Amino acid sequence: MLSSAVADVISSGPATAGRKRARSDSVSSVPATDSPFRIAKLESTVSLPPAYLGRAHLGATELLNDRLLKYDARFGGVMLSYSSLRVEGSHGAVFEDCPEIRYRIKYRALLFMASKGSRLTGRINQVSAGHIGLLVFGAFPVSIIRERLQSKYQFSGATGNYVSSSDSEDILAPDVSVSFRVHAVDTTSPTDWFIEGTMADADLGPVRESDLASRFADADADEAEPSAKKVKKEKKVKKEKKAKKEKKAKKEKKAKKEKH
């Protein structure tokens, strides 16, 4: 569940004359958790061409759609989806000789943020003599170069896989799930970004499917516990309101009797 931790990030994107663009972003309600996923409340100032007069919501929607699945330095991650988009105020603003109209918007977004040093699990989809490629959650690309693998793993030209020198069954091959740490995020291209991983530490490497299933079960339990507390709290509030209402009704009834 989300925590009450708050992080504010404000930065400006590059200007692009005649096109929709976001000037700044404010991120709040980012949970402090090891999960790479974040649900955030965002605020942005967007600049829209005059063609979007009276249609600011449409312009903002098109701008946010264009941001989806692209790495954004303002967030330090990728926006996967958004909801509850709202344009603040009924009018935009024009500054100096800029032909575009600025609007302030608010929305909620689901972000994927792989921070350096965080531990993730991915499934190998490519193996070569120079690196192994992974997919995290079946979507986010990872590259781990040979130099960042543990020294025990040696590439076998015969099988095309990496085999441990201490255990012949310890193999890095396609469809094997492995744990790794984020070394960096290559953002040379916002659309072709990828995670640079490392498996140099002894506690990193192949993960058994049973371990993965257990991890997801624990995550589900963690989600269920706060939900149960929320339901219990709502029932308590409802009960208190009912008792207060009944008390008020009795008081009014008594007052009427005394009056007559």
Image (cartoon, rainbow, N blue to C red):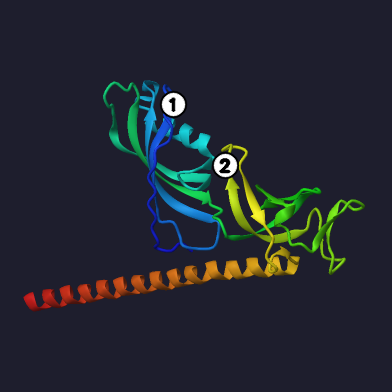
Q: Residue furthest left?
A: 259
Using residue 32 as the reference point, say whether residue 100 is left or right of it: left
Residue 161, image quadrant:
bottom right
- Look at the numbered disc 2 and give the secondary structure of its residue: loop
Quarter of the image where the C terminus is located: bottom left
Residue at horizontal 48 percent and vertical 32 percent from the top: 62
Q: Which mark is residue 238?
A: none
Above or below: residue 82 compared with residue 259 = above
The residue pinned by badge 1 equals 16
Q: Amino acid at mark 1?
A: Thr
The residue pinned by badge 2 equals 187
Residue at horizontal 40 percent and vertical 47 percent from the top: 42
Q: Nearer the viewer, residue 122 or 252?
A: 122
Q: Position of residue 94 (x, y in %)?
A: 28, 26
Compare marks 2 and 1 and give the one earlier in the sequence: 1
Residue 212, image quadrant:
bottom right
Above or below: residue 235 compared with residue 154 = below
Q: Position of residue 249 (x, y in %)?
A: 21, 73
Q: Amino acid at mark 2?
A: Thr
Q: Position of residue 39 (x, y in %)?
A: 47, 54
- Look at the numbered disc 1 and give the secondary structure of its residue: loop
Using residue 93 as the reference point, say whether residue 149 is left or right of it: right
Residue at horizontal 67 percent and vertical 65 percent from the top: 201
Mark 2 or 1, closer to the camera: 2
Q: Nearer the viewer, residue 25 or 110?
A: 25
Q: Measure the alpha-carbon separation of dots 2 and 1.
A: 20 Å
